[in-house]
Amino acid sequence: MSSIHSETMRKHLKLYFIMGSINCQRHPVNVLSEAIAGGITLFQYREKGPGALMGQANLDLAKQLQKLCREHHIPFIVNDDISLAMAIGADGVHVGQDDESASVIRKKLGAHTIVGVSAHTFAEAQQAIQDGANYLGIGPIYPTQSKPDAKEVQGTGLIQELRTKGIDIPLVGIGGITVDNAAAVIKAGADGISVISAIANAASVRDAAASFI
Ligand code: TZP
Ligand code: MG
């Protein structure tokens, strides 16, 4: 069982910024700091892909970004790396379908840890809910440049299907979300949106985050 209240989770998901060092043209601490100033409500450290930091450098950056999040009361989520999350006492983890199940992760990390799971079908969503996920990430909603192995673009169909069928778990849409198409994701039934490039690559990271809000 998880101790995180769904209504609290929904608020956190409103503007979920995801980033690793390879998504940044400037130092990640500066990018995250500006995104926080712009009003992001949740942060995921996703250190992935060619050129991603490893070992001590990865640990050091995670700790720096976590410190910044703590100072601003933004929950700090780690993508995939359960050992890193445990080592630094992250507020949560986000995993995909190829990772350990939410129930196994919950046993390792405890009731107070946020566990998010990516789901691409109704069956995957049902399973993640049964396993005790706190929220689901649904996507890619639109075409994305940020995840080379992303599944097929699905639009807002699955979000609508889940809501129509009475699934009330906190949901966040991901993939190619911009200020221009974000409203459609919320209208479909998501509690929030997750964004990499539309914030990390913006000329003004702060203004980009603020414009979503
Ligand atoms: N999972 C599905 S799409 C995606 C991830 C991590 C990348 C989202 O990045 P962007 O730049 O907001 O499209
Ligand atoms: Mg994964």
Image (cartoon, rainbow, N blue to C red):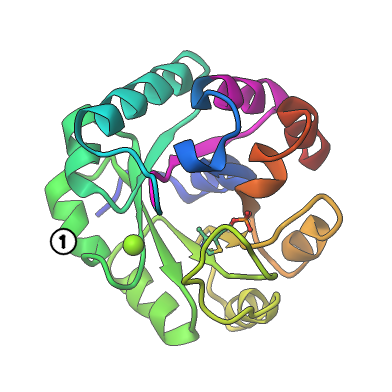
Q: Which residue is mark 1?
A: 104
42 left or right of 116?
Answer: right
Q: Nearer the viewer, residue 183 or 3?
A: 183
Front residue of this view, candidates 128 and 82? 82
Q: Residue at x 73, y 35 (%)?
A: 209
- Residue 54 painted magenta: no
- Residue 74: horizontal and vertical position, in percent? 50, 28
Which residue is found at the position 80% from the left and 29% from the top?
207
Instruction: Read off the magenta span.
Output: 30-48
Query: Does residue 20 appear in the picture of this structure?
Result: no
Residue at the left extreme?
A: 108
Viewer-closest of 166 and 188? 188
Callout 1 secondary element: helix
| 37 is within the stretch colored magenta | yes
> Of the residues shown, which amino acid type is indicated by label 1?
Val
Instruction: Please identify the quadrant where the C terminus is shown.
Output: top right
Q: Is residue 124 left or right of residue 3?
A: right
Q: Check the image and report above or below for 51 versus 185.
A: above
